[in-house]
Amino acid sequence: MMKKISVLLLAIALLLSVPACSMPDAIFSDGLGSESEQDAAREAAEIYGFEFTLGGQKMALPLKFGVLSSRKWRISEAVENPDEDQAAQKKDIKVYTAESTLEAGEYSDYLPLTNDNSVITAKFYNDSNSQKLITDCPVVGIGLDAAYENVPEFILHKDNLSIGVSYDEVIGSCGKPSFIEKTVKTTGELAAINDVKLMETEEDTVNTLYYKLTDHSFIAFEIDTVNGVSNCISSIIIENDTDVYKPYDYSKEQKYIPDNISLYKGPNLLGKQFTDFAYKYEGNLYTLPLPVRKLLDDGWVFVRDYGERIPMGTTVDGLIMRKGNLSIKMMVHNYDTKYAHTAVNCYVVSMEAALTGPNASILLSKGITLGSTEKDLVDALGKDYAKKHPVVDSEGNYLPSSGHERYEIPDMPENYIEKTVGEEYTVYSVIMPDDVPTITLPVSITDIGDTGAELLGDIRKHIDVYVSNDTRLIYRFYLQNCPEYVVDEAKIIEEQIEAQREKEREERKKQQEQGNNG
């Protein structure tokens, strides 16, 4: 009974740790397909509320373990066939129980929870800054499987999806998945990935549909034979570690458009350099800094927003927007010179996206996408990429032995590339000094402090591209371009002259009125 769910969880772990596994036969399309498929994908927003009914009780992830324990769910100490789980036999693998503690930021494995004869699995996450007992940590994942003798009542909120529902019903309800993977049942080995259609299954393989926003925000439907009927949901994993916020109503803010937003003009071309901070998704071109309003106009919706007003000159992190099955994490900055604003009237100054299927259609400059090879990236960086900068530790540069190297960018000596080799991935960072001109924002201002500067770090303009050390494929990138306020002296003088003229007109009008009264 535990064998099948262990295989699914192992497959999930393999795919979520992209740098640690290979992805043979990977096929990624350039987009979400037809308009009807895109519409269905947008309608999948309801499943990204991560709401479900368990035993007749409505719940949503993440949730407190007390919600489950109050309904008599208990962490089970018994595993039917522990010898089948080879990973559990390794001495370096932590075994989680009801008495376990989690370190700050630690995720548990999926643990069996029992209620009378019913069994589900649950994953815990310590979102605090200190060690905690596992039962004091939020539950961020729930799993159930048709292989259990007594499957509890479980309904995922979107057309009542549950065990036994057909593949066609899942697609009709949720739209196209982020990807479909084929794994070997007995080992959990990843056999293939396909984001287009259900793959033909062999005797010992199974397909799993993933609707994925981030590594820890996804829904997985295993498709197999259930009670003699093929192509049905045989197991479900629903996981989410981030509170889902009720979208803020931006209708009032959208009626007022600050000058620095209304004067914005988007790019006409993708750009020839990485330092153009440009990318393309579903036919739309974007470049940072980018008005949040532009994303809303193009059909993006908030998964996590920031409803409070952001003071001028302030940066706020952690906003997440979604379009289809792709999500981006953002920092936004208020460039208005007069007022505080909610996010809709601010600029996106950083965005991060990771490989989860169709978002391979995100295109950077020079033809680089999520899923491109490391060789493609190195070729795009230029033939002079191999020319190293002098490395002098006493001047603050990295020593080669530390895993850091610096290189020149062809024809752009003021910029540089920093290559950092980690245990699981290599990061190529294209960095621009703060004093290098970038996009000129349509604002004029004398000077105000940036109260969110600590979020930006020492470097405000850079692009980080992550390459898996195992697959040598690009699986994540991060763009940040937060230019300082631009002082348009000509505009300031013009405004001052106009203000003086208006003052003189008011004085003449006042004198005229006094003369008429006299």
Image (spheres, rainbow, N blue to C red):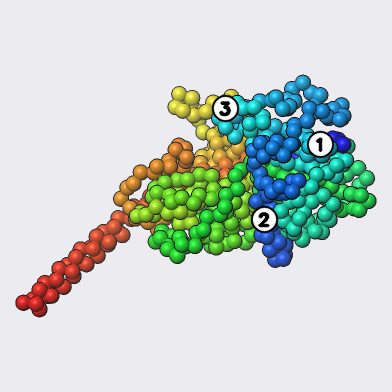
* Mark in front: 1 vs 3: 1
**How far is disc 1 from disc 2 in space, using C-alphas?**
31 Å
**How far is disc 3 from disc 2 in space, using C-alphas?**
33 Å
Of all residues shown, which one is farthest toward the top? Answer: 91
**Residue that numbered label 2 is attached to:** 46
Q: Nearer the viewer, residue 368 or 424?
A: 424
**Residue that numbered label 3 is attached to:** 130
Left or right of 446? Residue 195 is right
What secondary structure is found at the residue carrying circle 3?
loop
Residue 359, given in percent of the width and then of the height, sits at: 67, 52
Q: Is residue 470 visible?
A: no
Left or right of 263? Residue 125 is right
Q: Amino acid at mark 2?
A: Glu
Marks 3/2 in contact by CB < 8 Å: the verdict is no
Of all residues shown, which one is farthest toward the bottom? Answer: 516
Residue drawn at x 57%, y 42% as measured from the top left: 464
Q: Nearer the viewer, residue 131 or 261?
A: 131
What secondary structure is found at the residue carrying circle 1?
loop
Q: Nearer the viewer, residue 436 or 450?
A: 450
Of all residues shown, which one is farthest toward the left? Answer: 518
Residue 3, given in percent of the width and then of the height, sits at: 86, 35
Q: Residues within 10 Å of mark 1 (few under 14, many from 20)?
A: few
Q: Quadrant of residue 90?
A: top right
Q: Residues within 10 Å of mark 3 (few under 14, many from 20)?
A: few
Looking at marks 3 and 2 on the same chain, the residue that comes earlier in the sequence is marked by 2
Residue 335, given in percent of the width and then of the height, sits at: 41, 52
**Residue that numbered label 1 is attached to:** 116
Left or right of 302? Residue 158 is right
What secondary structure is found at the residue carrying circle 2?
helix
Vertical relation: 27 (above or below) 172: above
